[in-house]
Image: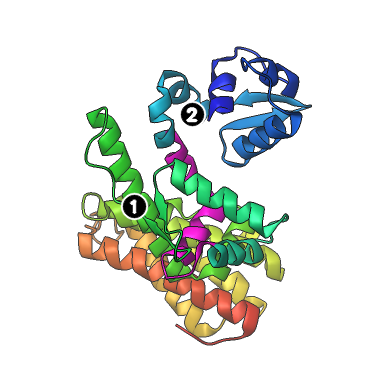
Amino acid sequence: MDVAKILANSPDPMSLQDVNRSFPKPKTEGYVNAALTMCEQLGLCKSKYGAYVSAEKYRDDIKLSTRDQHFVILRRCLNQYSPFLLYINFGSKGYTSLQAAAAATGILKIKGSLDVIEYTLRRLGGYSQLTEYNKSTGNIKVKEPPERLSAEYVAKLMKALEAELKTKVFIIDLLSAEVFAYFDRKGITVDNLTDALVDFENDPRTAAGKSTRTLELFLYRLGEDVGAKVQEANGVSQLADRIKEVDAILPKHQHLVYGLGAVRNMSDHDPEKQTGKEWEITKHGGLLTTLLVPAVIRSVYLYHTAKRQEF
């Protein structure tokens, strides 16, 4: 986080040498390069032509944060970092830290030494105060937020980030690790599904809309993979039609998508033509939609990859 802090306070792009000169005692080139690479992977900075700039998303927060608050920003990054999410997903099921890291490494096809990857993921969890490591068993677990913090807003943010992490782990469970890895390869995040599950009671309409948007993006990416004419489709129902035309899904998949397509229209589109009134989306409807979407995505993916008829 010290490197991220330096970049956030610099008005100009910085080279590796510029960053190194910002420390009272120069670090090794390998250390600084590794730190910059990790910052870039976590979304804390961007690089172009050998120069690094702070990511706009985090720049102001990093600049204003004190050193003892850096872990809160790191938490936000880790909640978006696929290797860490999958690592936590396995670790929360009783796998050791090394086993969890190995699973994430294999599923996401991460290059590098397993020992280094495990150490990095474990250290990130520890520094961010998201996880604690049991040396005697080698296991990890998600920590509860500490009771005493320097500021109330930090406490609230930590609780929100903890809820977000646990919700993402739950969503990954519903999808399966292999579907999550497919999402990662295709640039699909679980953010909308996570938001929907966190907010369905307060805003069920938005929850239903966000969860079905994830379904729509998944179907579009899958359609591209199977050679369907997805560019001609408008909405999830038509995407299902185009994918069915190339026999990549079954009729029952198609019908499941039709139902979710109707919910998408209820949440995102104009009033019902027959009545001229908008649909009311209840919290039960928002929750059921949010839980059904991952189940449908998983079922479609399993049929696509292994011809498994499972729901």
Q: Judge by depth and name the residue closer to the eye, 142 or 237.
A: 142
Residue 274 x/y as whole percent: 27, 62
The structure residue drawn at horizontal position 27% and vertical position 43%, both measured from the top left corner, is 146
Can you say which quadrant of the picture contains the C terminus?
bottom left
229 on left or right of 99? right
251 on left or right of 226? left
Query: Is 297 in the magenta?
Result: no
- Segment colored magenta: 73-97
Identify the amino acid type marked 1.
Lys
Q: Is residue 268 visible?
A: no
Residue annotated with mark 2: 58
Q: Is residue 147 visible?
A: yes
- Mark 1: which secondary structure? loop
Q: Judge by depth and name the residue closer to the eye, 21 or 84.
A: 21
Residue 47 x/y as whole percent: 70, 30
The structure residue drawn at horizontal position 57% and vertical position 74%, both measured from the top left corner, is 301
Q: Judge by depth and name the residue closer to the eye, 59 or 202.
A: 59
C-alpha gap between disc 1 and disc 2: 24 Å
Identify the amino acid type marked 2.
Tyr
126 on left or right of 177? left
Magenta: main secondary structure: helix
Query: Is 85 in the magenta?
Result: yes
Frontmost of labels 1 and 2 is: 1
The structure residue drawn at horizontal position 77% and vertical position 27%, both measured from the top left corner, is 50
Residue annotated with mark 1: 143
Which tag, 1 or 2, sits closer to the chain's start?
A: 2
Residue 56 x/y as whole percent: 53, 26
Q: Judge by depth and name the residue closer to the eye, 127 or 51.
A: 127
* Residue 17 vertical position relative to residue 254 in the rendered view, above or below: above
**Few, some or many residues within 10 Å of mark 2 (<14, 14–19, 20+):** some
Residue 8 got which mark? none
